[in-house]
Amino acid sequence: MDSPLYLRSRQLEKLDKQQIALLVLDMQDCFLNPDSHAFVPSAPAIVSNIKQLMEIFCRLDLPVIRTRHTNTDENAGMMKLWWRELLTPDKPSTALIAELAEPHTTILDKHRYDAFFETQLEQMLKDRGIRTLVITGVMTHLCCETTARSAFMRGFGVLFAVDGTASYTREFHRASLVNLAHGFAVPMLCDDICRLLENNQ
């Protein structure tokens, strides 16, 4: 069986800078505000790394898509059985954080862990000829991992930002990285992704 390092090298060799997009998942007040019951303690640490990626993607005129998670009783599905409080659209805490505000990005509302589920994401990517997604945001083991797997199943290559994703615990974060690296995504540091884009011009 091919080693993970060989598979990573093979995937990166096929990378076309004009066919890559950045996905920033659910960087919302509810997950980054210490006063929120849903606060992800490590999430504030990834903001500057995501911002760095957003800046280079925007400078190179590459797509940046920021998702905002909201739910109603009608569209939450099984999620309403798992979580004590739904992120209904009327709550101020569903707002995307100001630190990552950028006019040259697309905002996409989603209602499940999978950013492709019942959204226009796949069509948006295909319309731009995108073949590879860089995945960042929260939470590593829920929306980020689910979306990475869904992207793979739809034929997209996935670069998974190790220090651009965050979860409740180190165990959740590490488990997702280990699993994804074995057949779904290439885990990379944000600095390495930036260098890859700069050197691929």
Image (cartoon, helix red, strand yellow):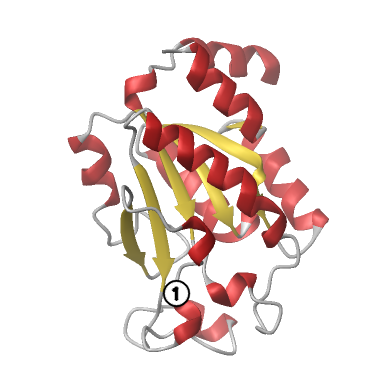
Q: Where in the figure is residue 53, as x and y percent of width and height?
A: 52, 38
Residue at 37% of width from left, 83% of height from top?
89
**Where is mark 1, residue-wise?**
95
The quarter of the image holding the C terminus is top left
Does the image show residue 3?
A: no
Question: Which residue sits at x=69%, y=84%?
Answer: 35
Q: Quadrant of residue 2?
A: top right
Quarter of the image with the N terminus is top right
The amino acid type of the residue labelled 1 equals: Ala
- Vertically, is 62 above or below 124? above
Quarter holding residue 126: top left
Whether residue 173 can be seen here: yes
Where is residue 22 drawn, in percent x and y? 43, 40
Q: Nearer the viewer, residue 66 or 123?
A: 66
**Along the viewing direction, whichever of 91 and 158 lies nearer the viewer:** 91
Please indicate whether residue 43 sits to the left or right of residue 123 in the image.
right
Residue 20 drawn at (x, y percent) = 38, 29
User: Where in the figure is residue 148, as x and y percent of width and height?
Assistant: 50, 44
Residue 57 is left or right of residue 140, and the answer is left
* Relative depth, front residue between 33 and 137: 33
* On screen, residue 65 above or below 187: below
